[in-house]
Image: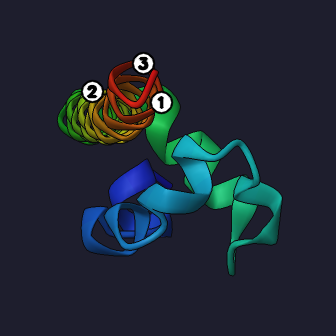
Amino acid sequence: MSHIEEIPCIEVLSSVVFIIEGVVEESQNPQAIASHLNTCLACQAEVIMNKRCICCYKMRYVAHVMKELLKTYTAAFMKSYCAK
């Protein structure tokens, strides 16, 4: 039986978050998903693309938080420095 017959791509891709987070065993059919990913280049590419998107999102979020912290601390510093 091929990976497509065992579990279709759409089922594998619906578990992409489990795969990316490294908890595929918590998905509905972990062995079939692993087998499918070992042989299906299209699903492998989709998982890689999603990993990159999530990584980029996390990096943008961290940059945003750091920018906001910098603004807050700069304002606090300027307020205390200028008050002297």
Spatial CA distance of label 2 from label 3 is: 42 Å
10 Å crowding of disc 3: few (<14), some (14-19), many (20+): few
Q: Identify which residue, 69 or 17, lies in the foreground.
A: 69
Spatial CA distance of label 1 from label 2 is: 42 Å
Dot 1 and dot 3 residues touching (CB under 8 Å): yes
Q: Residue at x 42, y 49 (%)?
A: 2
Q: Is residue 13 above or below residue 43?
A: below
Sequence order check: which comes first, mark 1 or mark 2?
Answer: 2
| Residue located farthest toward the front when viewing the structure as drawn | 84
Q: Answer left or right for 46 relative to 81.
A: left
Q: Which residue is mark 2?
A: 52
Spatial CA distance of label 1 from label 3 is: 4 Å
Q: Which residue is mark 1?
A: 80
Foreground: disc 2 or disc 3: 3
Query: Mark number for residue 81?
Result: 3
Q: Residue 40, percent across and down? A: 31, 35
Q: Residue at x 50, y 66 (%)?
A: 6
Q: Is residue 14 above or below residue 34?
A: below
What type is the residue that disc 2 sits on?
Arg
* SS state under label 1: helix
Q: Residue at x 40, y 31 (%)?
A: 83
Sequence order check: which comes first, mark 2 or mark 3?
Answer: 2
| Residue located farthest toward the right when viewing the structure as drawn | 25
Q: Residue 50, percent across and down? A: 27, 41
What type is the residue that disc 1 sits on?
Ser
Foreground: disc 1 or disc 2: 1
10 Å crowding of disc 1: few (<14), some (14-19), many (20+): few
* SS state under label 3: helix
What type is the residue that disc 3 sits on?
Tyr
Q: Identify which residue, 46 or 78, lies in the foreground.
A: 78
Q: Answer left or right for 34 relative to 73.
A: right
